[in-house]
Image (cartoon, coloured by chain):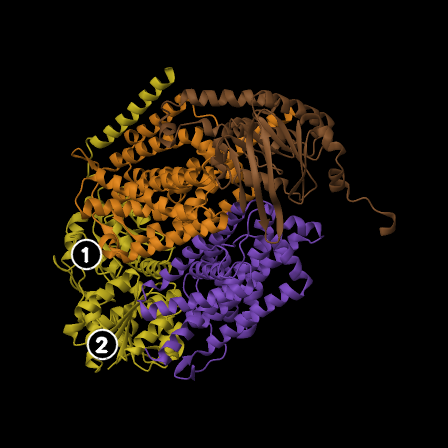
Chain colours: A brown, B purple, C yellow, D orange
Amino acid sequence: MSLLKVSHVTKRFGGLTAVDDLSFDVHEGSIKAVIGPNGAGKSTLFNLLTGFDRADSGAATFLGGDLLGRRPDTVVRRGVARTFQNTQLFEELTAHENVLVGVEPSLRAGFVRSALRIGIRAEERDARERADHILRLLDIERWRDVIAADIPHGVRRSVEIARALATGPQVLLLDEPAAGLNGAETQSLAAALYRIRDHGATIVVVEHDMGLVMEVSEEILVLDRGRKIAEGPPLLIQKDVAVIEAYLGEEVEDDDV
Amino acid sequence: MGSAELLQYVVAGFKSGAIYALVALGFTLVYGSTGIINFAQGEFFMLGGVLSVFYYRLGLPLLLAALAGVVTTAGVGLAFERLALRPRRDAGALVLIIITIGGSMVMKSLTRHIFGPDEATLPEFTPGPSIAFGGVAIERQALWLWGLTIVAVLALTWLYRKTRFGRAMRACSLSHDAARLMGIDTARVVMVSFGLAAALGALAGLAVTPLTQTAWDVGATAGMKGFAAAILGGLGNPVASVIGGLVLGLLESLSVAFLSSTYKDAIALIVLLIVLFLRPQGLIGRARREKV
Amino acid sequence: MKRTRVILVLLTIVALLWALGCAGKPGEDESSLPEASAEPYRIGVVISLSGTYAGLGGPEQKAIDMEVARINAEGGVNGHPIEIVYEDDATDAAKAQAAVVRLIDEVGVIAVLGASGTGQTMAMRADIERAGVPQISMAGGSAVTAQLSEWVFQTPWPNRIVVPFVLKAMAADGYKNIAVISDTGGYGVDGHDVIVKSAADAGVTIVADETYNPGDADMTAQLTKMRGANPDAVLVWAAGKEAATIAKNARQLNMTQPIYGGSGIARLEFISGAGEAAEGVKLGTGKILVPEAYGEGTEEYEVATSFIDRYTEEYGEAPDIFAGHAYDAFGLVVDALGRVEGEATPAALRDAIEATDGWIGVGGTFSYSAEDHNGLTEDDLVMYVIEGGTWKLAE
Amino acid sequence: MKRSMGVAAWMALVAVIGAVPLLTDDRYLLKVLVFVGINVIIVSGLALLFGYAGQISLGHAAFVGIGAYASAYVTSGLGLPWLVGVLAGTTLAAIGGLLLAMPSLRLRGHYLAMATLGFNEIMYVIFREARAVTGGNDGLSGIPFPEVLGVRMDTPASIYLLVWGTALVVVFLVANIVRGRPGRAMRGLHGSEIGALACGVDVARLKIRTFAVSAGLAGLAGTLYAHAVGFVAPSTFSLEQSVVLLAIVVVGGTGSLAGPVIASIALTLLPYADALIPGLGKDVIAFLQDWEADIYGIAMIVVVVLAPKGIGGLIRAARSRSRAEETG
């Protein structure tokens, strides 16, 4: 059953068409990878889906409603969370506090109840426990009370994933989570992705690390210059000519030189 | 309202407009290369006047005193950038603004301690009665003001367009990281921009002193109006800042003509807020989108 | 559960504190002022040594310092030396109030001189009246004595006598239609109100009425509007540096009408700032600018020249009108102290000040009464004209 | 105030503050402490807006003015009871904060600084020109003392207790806001507006409500000022005052409440140092008063250059880094 249905989404920046009449589905409980050379429109697609940018045309139906044109915080409340290519952590807050902010959508306490500390004890305690639980899920509870600025690069990505997870999403959009990770870190990220999916979230991940993509994703969407050039299970995509050309450039005929 | 009288209002508007334009150029220069608004720009305007008076009273001839005033103020601008801003150069805009606010407080109060509270003036550059031109009287000092504004904007445009240093400044305004990758010493660019902005502010300050006198507390109003002009035209673009200054001066003068003078100051504030709320990039500038 | 109970306790304590506050501390005694025995008479002075009125506080302090030294050298008053305690209100109403409370309660002064500005003077009134200590203010705003308080006196010539004086002089010189320009500061607004009220009975009509804000760079727009109403003369009511700019702008606009003004432009900085544009400007104020105005050989002349000569010799510059106001304020208190029999309590001193009749000061001859706490009349004013870069007596 | 001060600490604080008027009847000290208490209330609001939510404001003196003039007019002008004046002043200032925040949502950094600066200047013109209500330049005098249920608070001791009682409650409430969900969302907004949006924080609503609460507190302080001093003039609510208030929060440190509160007590007492240390020489006081603006300016730069997080931040940064080494 398709959880998220993207149909005919287009986005132009002046002359350049960043996303060109793109349609695809994301099935519930699956991990879908989106690959393509730089500038293929991957991050732009994420921005359109999460309200950080407005699409020129098309629709993205999620649980019966259209995601496009919504404000970013509304998109999150509906259950679609994301991370960023360059992490947007709260540098002066600890890892635990960063994730705690992520718990925001499920909290009810406003200014008045917080000020008078009436009826928020339970909500606050649950929020803290939830954050600790997610830190453990991502295996980064050791960094609980360290401020983001002092956390090494590899762990920062996991903190941002944890923060996105804390919003209680049904769909998690990860923008190049493996960028800058070494072999071991990538392996533990793969394990974490499985745990997240088993935790009940559907994942769409933009990634260049083919090893990781082939290993975790059930379906791969390949983009080039904003257009879908291939979609299907990893084995099929691997052999697809169009994909190879997109990445490696056309075959050079001898006489062209 | 006769046409001569209307023209007189326009001349009056362009006279104060030229003052706002010169201060606005200082804002544009610093914003161009550092992306921040220098809240101490108004104090550079004040220092231009006060220091020139100080040198003049030492006995230097007017031109030398003016030059010394501009150079000393430029020195203050360089020192301020080097000592206060440089250490936190990569901090966010908020931190840099606070440093310039602190700087303006110190410069203003220190001037009162050193040069005393009373106002002072300078003789006109070319003394003599105002020039009659089609029923309109134009003060000679106003001609100096317009001349200096034109020279300043041409020089700045030439610097930006034609010189290597100008290109380095424009690179910095787009992105310090990229500029550094190109081997541009961004620290030097920022420092020189501050020196130049201080000199421009000082130039405006001393050119207006024969008309309106100078004192330790003239910086605040000039700074606020200069910023309103810069933002009205479009921050970062020298020609736009001058247009912003002239338009603001005209609006004020016409508001006295058609409304009443109590609204004269409020006009600059209202313009500032309207532009900020509706079109922060100003009449001419391009919007700078923050990429996610 | 334990936490909420503790917080409730906490909140009740705070509520208790409030309640305690409402009840006020019982047994508040008023008379905690030290007795004025053979020790020195302590006088408090609140002036602006920083902030926008920094230019007024300086000369005021110099005048008082000079006079205290002279009086104490002559053995003080009835054998008591005078001790002056200064406070800088930094042109801020809140600081002025804190300063006056410190002087009254902490230092135990028997009189307060100041403040330099009208706003600061008014801020002190509640405490002056509560403690019952006489105050002589050097601020020129009419409100100081228009809103009469038995404890508050004033030395400068208030707008309500200077404005009619200048308007009558303009009418006498044959200028009926006048254009008025005033600043939006305390002095300018106060003067403007009096001008509007007393123009008719002074025999002049206002054909243009413009204002400007302190700090304005250019007034040509307002002057163009005034020129359009082709007035016979221009009346400037302003205290700041912008007045000189107005004179210059007017001349540059080829406005040939004569310019008149009040005490606000009776400053050397106006002449140096306006340059030639100051030539021919007429202004009405006290007689301090040209001692001959007191009439050579008269006692007023002796008093004024002695003050001007001593001040010039001590500080190397002639005293301005603000120094004169401070000299008068201090002189009035010393004179009143001399007339107090027995112990110089603040109340006795207040009565003595109010009884002042014909005390010759620099600003004029002061005669206070229960209704008039300003003590000056039009006879203490005179018209000047600026010629050759200095003030001359106008015929 | 990462970990909230224990209840014992609060109790001690309340006791100390409550005891002062019982220990001394020095009216000068009490009057000075009233000004300090009023500043603590303003600074708590500004620390919330600027220190936590990262929204700069150069217009807070105008909000104080709105509170002061509204309360003065309602009580001495319309003759309504004091409490009505306080309510009117606080709500009107909060509405002012709302109206300023709404069009400024997109503005950041220097643009927001300039918009709030423009607002302060416009309010200053209104305070000066609306003579019927504000008394113009000569200001409004004869503002009645606070009075509730027939009890008049006209002694410095009673006003001291009223102001500091209010200040305690305000700091307590703000401390709770900061520790709870709104505080976290604000610090998130301050850290990265995009990141906060990605966490589902309604940034627009948060900015508007924080502005309103912060402005309301400044207005509340304004009403206390008006009735404590009995006199209100435009010059007290000028741009210089807004810059001083911002300087206090900067010196106090962002992301902390204790820092700005301590800084506001220290810096407000600066020119009145002789109130605390009677023996202090007259020339020292004259020096402090004369050089007050310079000291604020230099303190602001030194703190931002050397200790970017100010007093409050120093402790926290050290604590976290030590933990990073252990884990690393």
Chain holding disc 2: C
- Residue designated by label 1: C336
Q: Nearer the viewer, residue D106 or B261?
A: D106
Q: Position of residue A21 (x, y in %)?
A: 60, 43
- Residue designated by label 2: C295
Give me the residue at 33% from left, 23% from top: C10
Using the rendered image of the protein, determine whether residue D310 is visible from the camera's viewpoint.
Answer: no
The residue sitting at the top extreme is C1
The residue sitting at the left extreme is C370
Q: Secondary structure at mark 1?
A: helix
Q: Position of residue A83 (x, y in %)?
A: 58, 34
Q: Earlier in the sequence, mark 2 or mark 1?
A: 2
Q: Nearer the viewer, residue C233 or C331?
A: C233
Q: Nearer the viewer, residue A235 or C148?
A: A235
Q: Position of residue C360 (x, y in %)?
A: 20, 66
Which of the labelled discs sits on residue C263, or is there none?
Answer: none
Give me the residue at 30% from left, 37% from top: D30
In the picture, the quarter occupied by the C terminus of chain D is top right
Chain holding disc 1: C
Q: Label 1: few (<14), some or many (≥20) within 10 Å? A: many
Callout 1 amino acid = Ala
Tell me: residue B193, above or below residue D300. below
The residue sitting at the right extreme is A254
Q: Position of residue C361 (x, y in %)?
A: 23, 65
C-alpha separation, residue under disc 2 versus residue under disc 1: 26 Å
Tell me: residue B242, above or below residue C128. below
